[in-house]
Image (spheres, rainbow, N blue to C red):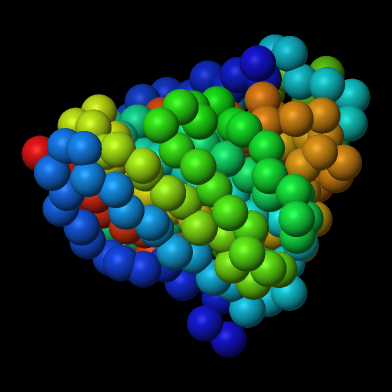
């Protein structure tokens, strides 16, 4: 199974940059790395997806090194509303074993 | 657009009862998914439907059945509920997905909180 490993929890303060790293040692050549955000009592929401190097959108950046065995989600200048659980997911063709959500990283942003 | 809708939002069942969770999407997506999420854990895939007329088992299919009624709707049925099925159930959809695509964004519904006593 395509398995990812993330820190269980992180703490930060408003205005800081937060980096959450995900390990995915057995990523396949055609797999993409996707990050989701989940607030309490809601379904996960797509944040960003990438294949290699760097991807940036209006809310986050995703850094993927050349070996693709890890990736880092970067949230610039977090606010209290960024308090949520963040999931790293390796998605690819071939079957359901590509849709494995780990326990995620619980980010708490403090005033 | 409503996106992905799920009914009901909450349900309490007694052991052995049956029920169907409904899911619909209005984004003309081809693929749909059912997940369960237990406290403090990530989501686990129960079943998925790559396209209308097809369904496949995910990681935890035992005790569940699904129906892809049409392109919009994907239902999950518990034939004989057990306390171990107490969970929050999420439906999701994507434009393309398993088994052929490598890149797809999933859109999730708000979830159904199910308690089996």
Question: Closest to the observer: B70 or B99?
Answer: B70
Where residue A99 appears, as percent x and y from the top left, is 63, 34
Q: Examine the rendering and report whether any part of residue A22 can be seen.
A: yes
| Residue at 22% in and 45% down | B17
Q: Examine the rendering and report whether any part of residue A108 can be seen.
A: no
| Residue at 58% in and 22% down | A4
Q: Is residue A29 above or below residue B102?
A: above
Please identify the quadrant where the C terminus of chain A is shown.
bottom left
Where residue B49 appears, as percent x and y from the top left, is 68, 49
Where residue A51 appears, as percent x and y from the top left, is 82, 39
Question: Closest to the observer: A40 or A72?
Answer: A40
Please identify the quadrant where the N terminus of chain A is shown.
top right
Question: Closest to the observer: A54 or B27?
Answer: B27
- Horizontal relation, residue B87 to residue A27: left or right: left
Q: Is residue B114 above or below residue A8?
A: below
Q: What is the total number of numbered labels drawn onto the structure image?
A: 0
- Horizontal relation, residue A6 to residue B101: left or right: left
- Horizontal relation, residue A95 to residue A6: left or right: right
- Horizontal relation, residue A1 to residue B87: left or right: right
The image quadrant of residue B48 is top right
The image quadrant of residue A24 is top right
Q: Is residue A69 above or below residue A72?
A: above
Where residue A40 appears, as percent x and y from the top left, is 28, 54
| Residue at 23% in and 32% down | B82
Question: Closest to the observer: B59 or B76?
Answer: B76
Q: Which residue ends up furthest to the bottom in the rendered image?
A: B1
| Residue at 68% in and 68% down | B70
């Amino acid at each position: 199974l395509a398995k990812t490993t993330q820190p269980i929890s992180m703490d930060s303060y408003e205005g800081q940059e937060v980096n959450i790293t995900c390990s995915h040692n057995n990523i396949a050549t055609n797999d993409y790395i996707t990050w989701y955000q989940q607030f309490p009592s809601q379904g996960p929401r797509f944040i960003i997806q990438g294949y290699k190097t760097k991807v940036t959108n209006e809310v986050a950046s995703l850094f993927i090194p050349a070996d693709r065995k890890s990736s880092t989600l970067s949230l610039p200048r977090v606010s209290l509303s960024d308090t949520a659980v963040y999931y790293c997911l390796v998605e690819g063709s071939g079957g359901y074993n590509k849709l494995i959500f780990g326990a995620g990283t619980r980010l708490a942003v403090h005033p | 657009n409503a996106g992905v809708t799920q009914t009901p939002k909450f349900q309490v069942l007694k052991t052995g009862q049956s029920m169907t969770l409904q899911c619909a999407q209005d984004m003309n997506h081809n693929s749909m998914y059912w997940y369960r999420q237990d406290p403090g854990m990530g989501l686990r895939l129960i079943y998925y439907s790559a396209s209308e007329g097809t369904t496949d088992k995910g990681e935890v299919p035992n005790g569940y059945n699904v129906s892809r009624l049409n392109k919009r709707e994907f239902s999950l049925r518990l034939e004989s509920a057990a306390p171990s099925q107490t969970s929050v159930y999420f439906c999701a959809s994507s434009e393309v997905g398993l088994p052929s695509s490598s890149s797809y964004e999933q859109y999730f519904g708000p979830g159904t909180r199910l308690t089996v006593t």
